[in-house]
Amino acid sequence: MTKTNGQNAARKLVRLRRRNRWADKGWKRAHTFAAKKANPFGGSSHAKGIVLEKIGVGAKQPNSAIRKCVRVQLIKNDKKIIAFVPNDGCLHFIEENDEVLVSGFGRSGHAVGDIPGVR
C-alpha cells in the first residue's frame, strides 16, 4: 500500500505517522516512562539512603577478588540496592545506619566490569 498523496491528505498522513510511532523502539521507550519506573533512583542521578549492611561481592571470572559493597535502602522509595564503595580503605569510613549519597554507576541498567548485580 502506498502513502496517501494529494492536496487534502495531510490529516491522514499525520494520523498514520502518530499511530506508527509506537512501532519504533526508541520512541516508545522515551515516551512510556518504563525506564524511569525500572530505575531505583526514579529517573534522578543521585539518591540518599541508609546503609543496612556491609557486604563483599565476589568478582566474576577470570578475576578473583572481593569487591567491597554496601546494601542501601533508599529514602525516597524504600527500594534496597547494592552500592559499590570505591578506593582502598573507604569502607572503614562507612558504618551501618549511616546516611549515604548514592550515584549512578556506569551503563544504565547494566552491571559494570566484574561486579555482578551492582548497577
Image (tube, rainbow, N blue to C red):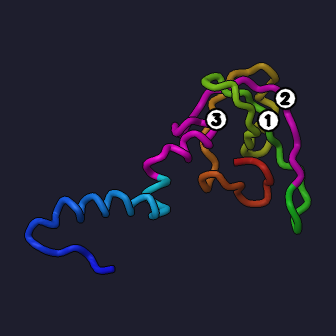
- Identify the residue at horizontal 69%, vertical 22% (top origin): 99
Q: Which residue is mark 2?
A: 53
Q: CA distance from mark 3 to mark 1?
A: 11 Å
Q: Which mark identifies residue 58?
A: none
Is residue 36 highlighted in magenta?
A: yes
Q: Is residue 66 left or right of residue 73?
A: right
Label 3 or label 2, whichever comes before in sequence order: 2
Residue farthest top in this picture: 97
Q: Which residue is mark 3?
A: 102
Q: Label 3 sits on what residue type?
A: Val
Q: Position of residue 110 (x, y in %)?
A: 67, 55
Whole-Å distance between the Cαs marked 1 and 2?
Answer: 6 Å
Residue shown at 26% from the left, 76% from the top? 3
Give the magenta range: 30-58
Where disc 3 sits, the SS reads: strand
Q: Are marks 1 and 2 in contact (CB under 8 Å)?
A: yes
Marker count (numbered): 3
The amino acid sitting under disc 1 is: Val
Q: Amino acid at mark 2?
A: Glu
Residue matched to label 1: 70
